[in-house]
Image (tube, rainbow, N blue to C red):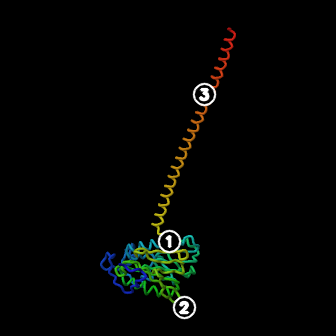
Amino acid sequence: MAKPAHEMSWLEDSDPDLELQDEEDGEVMLQRWVERPGGGFELVEMPLTLELYLNPRLGDKMTQGELHADLLAELKELLGRYFKPQLGVKVLMDVKHLVSPRRGPSPDISIVRGVRNPGRKLTSFNIAKEGVVPSLVIEVVSPTDARVRKMDEVDKVKLYERVGIPEYILVDPPRQANDHRFLFKGYRLDRLRRYQRIEPDAQGRLLSEATELIFGVSIEGQRIEVFNARTGERLESPAEVEIARKAAEERATREAKRAIRETTARKVAEERATREELARKAAEERAKGAEESRKAAEKELARLRVQIERLKKSAR
């Protein structure tokens, strides 16, 4: 039986051998287009080093697999939709953050408050030029490469602390070493501008004070859940939003059809009642005509009787 997330410890030096791993070594590589003498470009693949990881070039691509890509896309969509109504907030994914004039990492996800033009599409985020640092950085650690995990768990902790990122959360995807569950580890700057571990709540969830969000894991451990810390409401994923939209449309369609049926039935009943009322009035008219005819006949009969009696008397 899998342990709940809050009962499990973060695995600092765990076995990188995973069930989800398709390749034997699971090494994260960096792909870069390099210009060759005489013109033309060639795609070069190289092992990911600390220098390449903390200071990638525009266009560099790290091959970390489908799980990593899907998770980032889901988090970007989830958080982007949540923060979109809020002024001056930008959610970035895999965008180089310049912490010095020409150097800086490309966090998986960062949430930045106080951006002057949040609608502008960036090739890089210049911290000095923008005048703000991200409120929260999220990194999804490599499930297959222990070297890259160490860079996220050690080297980037030092870097983000030095830059002054208020909070840093690491997401460890499900793998054999962590009982096939998502795990979180988080850091928050203290008053001395040093990172301290964020203590999880009783459910193993991490509170991000900088964004007023709570990051947790579903009961089965296979899905990240994000909550509004003020309301406790869970942020719905794009798939859930689409399911809810379709359910609402189907419910509206059913209600419209029921309303049409009720309206049709009411009209049929009204038409039937109208026909019955017309038939009743016609019957009453016929009955009235028959009564008037009867009375006229009785009157005529009485007149004839009187006339006959008169003739009888005159004949005597």
Seen as rendered, the residue at the extreme bottom is 192
Kind of residue at badge 1:
Leu
Point out which mark residue 192 bears: 2
Helix, strand or loop at mark 3: helix
Depth check: give the residue in front, 68 or 313: 313
Which class describes the residues within 10 Å of circle 3: few (<14), some (14-19), or many (20+)?
A: few
Helix, strand or loop at mark 2: loop
Answer whether labels 2 and 1 touch (C-beta < 8 Å): no
**Quarter the N terminus occupies:** bottom left
Helix, strand or loop at mark 1: loop
Q: Which residue is mark 1?
A: 235
Q: CA distance from mark 2 to mark 1?
A: 33 Å
Residue at x 58% of width, y 77% of height: 114
Q: Is residue 147 left or right of residue 293?
A: left
Q: CA distance from mark 3 to mark 2?
A: 108 Å
The earlier-in-sequence mark between 1 and 3 is 1
**Quarter the C terminus occupies:** top right
Q: What is the x, y in percent for residue 31?
A: 38, 76
Depth check: give the residue in front, 316 or 9: 316
Where residue 129 sits, quadrant-wise, is: bottom right
Which class describes the residues within 10 Å of circle 2: few (<14), some (14-19), or many (20+)?
A: few
Note whether residue 236 is visible.
yes
The nearer-to-camera label among 2 and 1 is 1
Point out which mark residue 290 bears: 3
Q: CA distance from mark 1 to mark 3?
A: 78 Å
Q: Is residue 61 above or below residue 251?
A: below
Depth check: give the residue in front, 55 or 21: 21
